[in-house]
Amino acid sequence: MLDSLADVLPFAAARFGNKRALVFNDRSFTFTELDALSSALAASLRKLGVEPGDRVTLYAPNSWEWIVSYYGALKTGAVINPINVMLTPAEVVFVTKDCGSKALIGSPEKIEPALKAGVSNLRTIVFGGKSIAGTTPFDDLVAKPAAFERVPIKPDALSTIGYTSGTTGHPKGAMQSHRAVMLNGAMTAQMHLKSSLDTVVTALPCPHVYGNVVFNGAMLYGLTLVLHPRFDAAEILASIQLHKATMFEGVPTMYMYMLAHPELARFDISSLTRCTVGGQTMPKAKMEEVERRFGCPLIELWGMTELAGLGTTFPSNGPHKLGSIGVALPHVEARIADVDEPRKTMPRGEVGELMIKGPIVMQGYFGNEKATRETIEPDGWLHTGDLASMD
């Protein structure tokens, strides 16, 4: 394992070099180019006053700039705060204040409303070459190559504050170590046999933990990541055909739209060797239809923000059971607990609360000890809030 997420691109550049790492719209980048761009940004961020431990908020749809910003900020030793583009400007104000963000990086159409809503006292960087009043153009910060000596970071140091959707009250910031995020990406890649021979097409949002596992796994294992700014069934199918993708990773709704596309049969998607699905449940009959029409296994997975990604899935080279979320990731334990007595494990086949333990469990909720105590037992078991049974 690498020590930190700041090591991911330097490691990938040394190992995979000029292999194509990222495709976004009509642009593509090698691992070497992504490493250089992120170092240039890191050097610029340092000049703007971003120091180790500072929080840097990312607020934008999928883009190559998002990926560069993520690794560039991490190289400075900063803590990433990736936020959902669906958040309202008022929620962005809350999140940036709650985590004490030092800098805000994002796309113009997201940054402008946030500034008007009251986001203030932040170093604000806007994607593209044009600046909005009080902001710095992103293109200026990556224009000149710059060597950057990344800050030594210990694996247990805080890497990410990922806010959960605030279904009740304000969202909570789940704190993840570098080890947790890297281990989740690495063990998911292990389970799904990802390698430099793979090309993965995805439109999963980068700020979401599922999307995070996909792009970090791609960088760690040398995949070519074909990243889409948003999901469009025809565009995704055409992309799989064009790039001869071996993997597609998505949520059930995406598969439903692709199955319903009137010209599905016209696309050659025979290059696919496995697909993954998570985020919500999917009818078993529809999963069977995906496997039949896509000609490859559909591997189900389950996870949550508090786990830096997946908690369970199936190995792609073994048996899988449609309608089940699989087995625990390597290094991770899962059990079904009595809802009223968390220390009591339910007999096989009986329903209880799914609980998870291991190095991927969050360090707690940022600035919220009460919620942390309610979610993580003293012995390390995490309450997921999901009901399940184990066969």
Image (cartoon, rainbow, N blue to C red):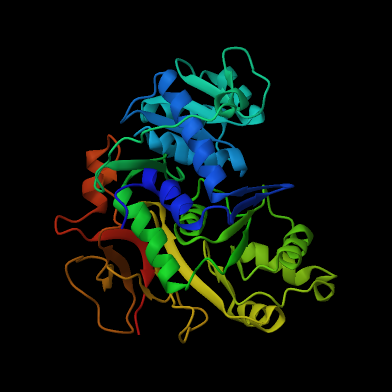
Q: Quadrant of residue 390?
A: bottom left
Q: Residue at x 46, y 87 (%)?
A: 319
Q: Residue at x 85, y 70 (%)?
A: 263
Is residue 90 depicted above or below 328 in this figure? Answer: above
Q: Residue at x 46, y 45 (%)?
A: 165
Question: As rendered, which of 39 and 330 lies closer to the eye?
Answer: 39
Residue 314 left/right relative to 235 = left
Q: Quadrant of the C terminus?
A: bottom left
User: From this viewpoint, which residue is outermost toward the left?
Assistant: 378
Q: Position of residue 248 (x, y in %)?
A: 62, 66
Q: Position of residue 75 (x, y in %)?
A: 39, 37
Q: Quadrant of residue 62?
A: top right
Q: Quadrant of the N terminus?
A: bottom left
Question: As rendered, which of 301 and 125 lies closer to the eye?
Answer: 125
Is residue 364 depicted above or below 367 in this figure? Answer: below
Marks counted in the figure total 0
Q: Quadrant of residue 382?
A: bottom left
Q: Residue at x 53, y 46 (%)?
A: 32
Q: Position of residue 56 (x, y in %)?
A: 43, 31
Asked whether the viewer can see residue 83, the reply is no
Asked whether the viewer can see residue 303, the reply is yes
